[in-house]
């Protein structure tokens, strides 16, 4: 009788494991890719969150502490180019797309993007009653004309093109007859010019000597002007720049007696004093008030918030898009402003074309409140 062969596991023979047939279906490939992704650490989300924390620290720190004596770093951040903070998006977007937890990564990037928009002063407000007839609008313009050369006739043409009623010109070195025959009058007070086709009823110029003694600018002048049977006050200012404080900062930082931070802190104190004086001068009149000029500080400066936040900022409230009023090849910042109190309603504001200098003109339309 023939014996049945023993099973391999009993006969001592070597057993070769049987490999299952590989599943090459698309569903299996997706499942394998998903399992592989889940086993990886969420490095994409970690990198995005680190970037978000850095953005929040720089944005909130600069907006809270810039132009204070808390730390020189945030004052520097207030005036240097801000767009490089958005460059990591070029790397982080593809990393987030191929990493784990995509929804959380892109959510964090969205928050960082909004912070960058806010930090780079991109306007999200829309102009007001733009349909108001021109005769119901008081059009104000301010322009620092000291950053280059131009033909005075080109400036006159620009003012006429804008159709401005009153213009404040900072760093003004025009000849007295620059606007002769144009329908406008012009006067120069300590380097600021007032150009107007409306009657100027009062001139109230502050003596700049006290501020000059402290190496400040001191160009502060207030005027009362008649329009539509009423009077409004306009103050033209050119305030001290942060430039001197920033220029000394990079030198000698390796020394124990590094004077850069102290020099910058002194500059902050000087500019705060000048803003306080200018803000107080603007309150000398009782009519609705406009303040225009080169403030040499952005609206997120602590000095600006302290002394000028009681007024409305026309560009902040009535523009959409970038609001750069001083630009170089690599850098743009908003340091020229048109402010107003509750006695006037702003109908719209914009940055208009310039004459090739580093500053750009700001234009805003107003009417008396309640009309």
Image: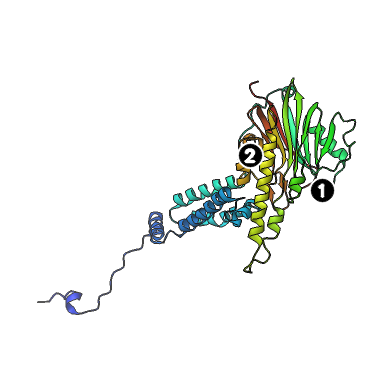
Q: Residue 364: where, in percent of width, then height?
A: 70, 33
For the residues labelled 1 and 2, say whether their Cβ atoms are less than 8 Å apart.
no
The image position of residue 28, as x and y in percent, is: 38, 57
The answer to whether residue 38 is left or right of residue 198 is left
Q: Secondary structure at mark 2?
A: helix
> In the rendering, at what x and y percent does residue 303 appear?
63, 45
Q: Nearer the viewer, residue 174 or 43?
A: 174
Q: Does residue 250 appear in this view?
A: yes
Q: Residue at x 74, y 19 (%)?
A: 229
Quadrant for the C terminus in the image: top right
Disc 1: CA contacts within 10 A as few (<14), some (14-19) or many (>=20): few
Quarter holding residue 290? top right
Q: Earlier in the sequence, mark 1 or mark 2?
A: 1
Q: Based on the displayed image, in which of its 4 quarters is residue 160 positioned?
A: top right
Residue tagged 2: 308
Residue depicted at x 72% and y 55%: 244
As drawn, the label of residue 148 is: 1
Image coordinates of residue 107 in percent, x first then y, are 48, 48
Q: Nearer the viewer, residue 123 or 194?
A: 194
Q: Which one is in front, 343 or 49?
A: 343
In this rendering, position of residue 269 left or right of residue 41: right
How busy is the neighbourhood of tag 2: few (under 14 within 10 Å), some, or many (20 plus)? some
Spatial CA distance of label 1 from label 2 is 29 Å
Q: Nearer the viewer, residue 286 or 75?
A: 286
């Amino acid at each position: 009788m023939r014996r049945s062969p023993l099973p391999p596991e009993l006969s001592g023979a070597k057993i070769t494991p049987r490999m299952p047939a590989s599943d090459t279906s698309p569903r299996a490939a997706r499942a394998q890719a998903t399992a592989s992704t889940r086993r990886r650490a969420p490095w994409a989300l970690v990198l995005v969150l680190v970037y978000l924390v850095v953005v929040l620290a720089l944005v909130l720190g600069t907006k809270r502490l810039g132009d204070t004596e808390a730390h020189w770093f945030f004052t520097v951040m207030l005036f240097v180019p801000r767009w490089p903070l958005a460059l990591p998006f070029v790397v982080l977007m593809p990393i987030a797309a191929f990493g784990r937890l995509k929804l959380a990564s892109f959510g964090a990037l969205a928050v960082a993007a909004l912070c960058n928009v806010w930090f780079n002063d991109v306007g999200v407000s829309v102009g007001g009653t733009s349909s108001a007839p021109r005769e119901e609008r008081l059009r104000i313009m301010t322009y620092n004309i000291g950053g280059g050369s131009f033909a005075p006739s080109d400036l006159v043409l620009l003012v006429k093109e804008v159709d401005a009623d009153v213009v404040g010109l900072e760093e003004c070195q025009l000849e007295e007859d620059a606007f002769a025959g144009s329908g406008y009058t012009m006067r120069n007070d300590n380097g600021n010019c007032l150009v107007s086709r409306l009657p100027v009823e009062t001139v109230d110029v502050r003596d700049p000597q006290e501020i000059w003694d402290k190496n400040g600018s001191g160009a502060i002048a207030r005027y009362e002007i008649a329009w539509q049977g009423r009077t409004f006050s306009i103050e033209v200012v050119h305030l001290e720049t942060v430039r001197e404080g920033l220029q000394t900062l990079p030198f000698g930082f390796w020394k124990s007696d590094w004077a850069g931070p102290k020099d910058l802190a002194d500059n902050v104190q000087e500019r705060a004093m000048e803003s306080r004086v200018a803000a107080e001068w603007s309150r000398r009149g009782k009519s609705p008030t406009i303040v225009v000029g080169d403030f040499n500080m952005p609206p997120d400066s602590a000095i600006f918030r302290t002394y000028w936040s009681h007024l409305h900022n026309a560009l902040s409230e009535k523009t959409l898009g970038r609001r750069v009023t001083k630009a170089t090849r690599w850098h743009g910042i908003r340091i020229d402003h048109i402010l107003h109190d509750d006695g006037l309603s702003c109908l719209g504001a914009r940055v208009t074309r310039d004459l090739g200098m580093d500053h750009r003109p700001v234009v805003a339309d107003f009417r008396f409140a309640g009309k």
